[in-house]
Image: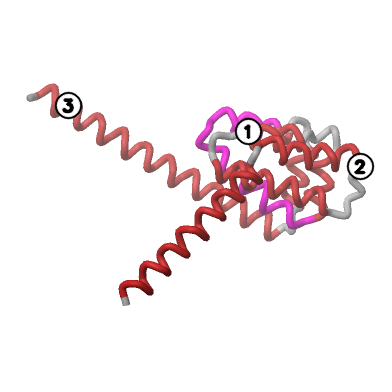
Amino acid sequence: EGAQSAHSQLMENARKACDLHNKVSDEITGCLTVLIEQTRGQALVSFCQQDGGLEALRRALDIERLHLASASLLWHGMQYTCVVTALTTRAAGGFSLLARLMSSPDLKAKIMAALCLGCIVRSDVGLPEEDRQECLERVAQTGILAALDEAEATAVRRGAEAMLKSEGGV
């Protein structure tokens, strides 16, 4: 009984620590997002231009739980041309970072990475055609477009079935 009580207490403490970690991660991501938005992307550009600036973000990708936070920060930065330009330079290595996010097991991170690549492709930063084509190929290779189409078709089918069911019951 004492061992089980200690085990239960240990598990409860682990859950609380995990919850605290998630809350802190969410708060930090929120603060960084506000910083990106208030500086109109310049904070992220400055980060990208530092020696090894994106290296910290790459290291964060070693922790699966941080994939969504990293993708979210990049996505918020993509609304600013200066960020798109900074990320697309070969020295910055933004493409390799987005490629890692595109292979994330976190679906939300994958979708945000695909949206980031879409932003790059549609931007006016003078992206060389080979890089533009590489972005499109990376998105296509993930199968995410087919998965999203399938999810949309399933949602439409379920909506129609629910509507027919409710009309039949009225």
Magenta: main secondary structure: helix
* Amino acid type, callout 2: Glu
**In this view, which residue lies farthest toward the top?**
3
Up/down of 162 relative to 60, above or below: below
- For the record, the magenta segment spans 55-80
- Observer-nearest of 42 and 1: 1
Q: Left or right of 36: which side holds 108?
A: left
Measure the C-alpha gap from mark 1 to mark 3. Answer: 39 Å
The circle drawn on residue 103 is: 1
- Observer-nearest of 92 and 51: 92
Instruction: Report the quarter where the N terminus lies.
Output: top left
Measure the C-alpha gap from mark 2 to mark 3. Answer: 61 Å
Return the disc, 2 or 3, that comes first in the chain's sequence.
3
What x and y, as percent, mark residue 33?
62, 53
Disc 3 marks which residue?
Answer: 6
Instruction: Report the quarter where the C terminus lies.
Output: bottom left
**Residue at 89%, 45% in the rendered image:** 127
**Residue at 53%, 33% in the rendered image:** 64
